[in-house]
Amino acid sequence: MKGRLVLNSVLKVVIQAIIIVVVLGPIYWMVSSSFKTVREIMSTAPTLFPRDFTLTGYMRLFRQGTFVPLLCNSIIISALTTVFSGVIATAAGFGTYFGRMKWLRSLKLISILAFVFPTTLLIVPIYQILVAIRAVDTVMGLVLVNIMLTAPFSFWLLEGFFDSIPRELEEAALIDGASRFQVNTKVILPLIRPGLATVVIYSFVMSWTEYSFSSVLVIDPHLKTLPLGVADVLAQYNIDWSLLTATTSLAMVPGIIFFALAGKHFISGLVSGALKA
């Protein structure tokens, strides 16, 4: 029995180590390569640590003067998407909870169907719609597309949290003299806080990494986001690996920081929402 417990413990450690290497290995390799020379990166004998530590890639990146504008564009678009997607999903959740918009409940299934088909199939019709409303090559056009990608899942998740709220809490608060606004802000919203946190993180990460629609809708180089900036480096005939790894490493930092600060809420909210749904 003791030998079996030891074997199980060893297997768990080995499996966890493999998962860590598979997940974090490529990230470490990219970050460490950003401090290597191009010759060392292209060498047939890979090195785990930089032999000749250099900041050439980062110096060239900031010398070009394109990274900061790309970063600002990504932050603006991701922030607007997160706010609007959260507001839309919350408003739809309130509509289903109070029962005054019962047709919204049927949208729960439809919102899941939005993930069945590849989103790239929607590029042409969405492009035509944005051309009709003159939103191509604009910040709000990108925000609208990101909302379309994030709002369905956000609504599906929050609707599960709203369904789990007992009606007795609402009725008790109203009997105690609370207004409808107070019921919403002091009773219901605190109960769905994990779901809101999940929606915020999900919307931010999805809009931060979105590339397919942006590559089609953005023409003005001043409106490009970080994923498009990284793609520009890849699109060159001779790939500058030092510049590419430096750009990609810095592009990951805001998303990693954001998820590190709120990742716990994302996991707990995602699991709770799935169970409640």
Image (spheres, rainbow, N blue to C red):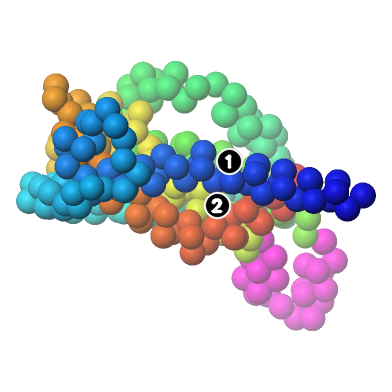
Asked if residue 50 lies in the magenta stretch, the reply is no
Which numbered dot is residue 18? 1
> Residue 173 location in percent, x, y?
77, 75
> Residue 186 location in percent, x, y?
66, 74
> Residue 157 location in percent, x, y?
65, 47
Which numbered dot is residue 199? 2
Please tell me whether mark 1 sits on a helix, a strand or a loop: helix
Are dots 2 and 1 in contact, CB under 8 Å? no
Residue type at mark 2?
Val
**Magenta residues, dominant SS class:** helix
In the rendered structure, the answer to whether residue 260 lies left or right of residue 276 reads left
The quadrant holding residue 155 is top right
Asked if residue 187 lies in the magenta stretch, the reply is yes
Q: Residue at x 67, y 49 (%)?
A: 13
Range of magenta residues: 166-192
Residue 260 lies, with reference to residue 240, above or below; the image says below
Q: Is residue 16 visible?
A: yes
Which of the two residues, 57 or 197, is positioned nearer the viewer here? Answer: 57
